[in-house]
Amino acid sequence: MDKTRETTIDINQIPYLTWTWLKINKDSVSYDFSLTENKGNEAQIPEGINVSSGKSISTNLPEPSFSIGQEAAKLISDATKEGKIYTVEKSTSQPLIIRIKLDSNSATHQIIHAKAGTAANIIIIYEGQAELAGVITKVYAEDDSKLHISKVQLCGNNVNQIDDTAVVCGERSKVSLTQIELGGAHIDVGFHATLDGYQSAFYSDTAYICQNNQYLDMNQVVVHKGKKTVCDMKTHGTAKDESTKTYRGTIDMVKGCAGSMGNEIETTLLLSPKAVVKAAPIILCGEEDISAEHGSTIGKLSKEMLFYMNSRSIDQKTAEELLTNAKVTAAASSIADENIRKEIEEFFQK
């Protein structure tokens, strides 16, 4: 990467700043953002989903926000010329499968537009060895639509990636997001979901393995605007070796979202004294009539669990591998393609 052309930006900034000395408010990166467009390849396009070029659509829904920040989003968007739009015209049982092969430093701009009353599964797989990849995925879920989006990151060890999923939900729409983070060197990943419509809902399930010298930085934000909206955010993973993992999770209950419910839970299995783990689960309340819970736990393999494993002739190293892989396998079980689930399992063996 050309050091003379690098741009330094703040990324994944927490919505409301906390103590500076905690060093959790944001991540800062320096990259050469001279990227080429990578549209990805559709491995499977089910009937009912239309594929076209573009970086904007016509909709009554408000524009979604970015978890990575406007500056990073603009750099990625500006590096794409056409972009790609996936329009769900009618419900389909088969998943749309998109593969993004990272052969060169690239930027990807995607729009997923679910029309009113439709339902679909979208699976996006990242793989390859490029040094830098930026991906923006905008999701518009019109009234009464249902989307399940899975993002599977199986990048090479030297990849730096910025990945953002920006979601906006109409009335009674439901969006589920499954994220699997396994490869890469420095990964900034997050989502920002706006529950704009009455009784809209957002569910996320993120699983990761952070190992060797990997740096994984996550920023997850859900903003409740409509009445009786629901979110449930789950993040589970393992940090070992000399890796670093940062988690920011924010549920923002703004005034007017009466009757809304939110929950977030983040757990980390810590397997090395040299691994660095930071977490900031946050709930912001601007409305009285709401219900919200959050929690974050960091722990080692308990003596009770280790004794249980040892009693069944499973040593500590094997027990750690089983529990580490189980977190990812549990999240991946919701991905609507058996072959992709097998790819994830095979990635463990590398």
Image: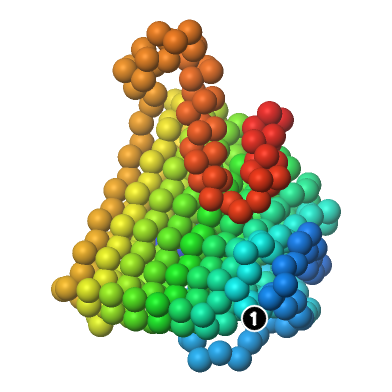
* Furthest residue toward right: 103
Residue 298 position in % (x across, y down): 36, 36
Q: Closest to the observer: 329 or 103?
A: 329
Q: Is residue 85 left or right of residue 327?
A: right
- What residue is shown with label 1? 89
In the depicted view, which residue is nearer to us: 96 or 218?
A: 96
Q: Position of residue 121 (x, y in %)?
A: 60, 63
Nearest the viewer among 4 and 94 is 94
- In the image, 289: left or right of 239? left
Q: Give residue 309's position: percent from left, percent from top.
A: 42, 15
- Point 60% across, 73% down: residue: 91
Q: Residue at x 73, y 61 (%)?
A: 98
Q: Amino acid at mark 1?
A: Glu
Judge left or right: residue 188 versus residue 41: left
Identified at 36% across, 20% down, the residue is 305
Left-right relation of 259 to 103: left
Can the viewer see residue 2 in this picture?
Answer: no
Q: Nearer the viewer, residue 344 or 153?
A: 344
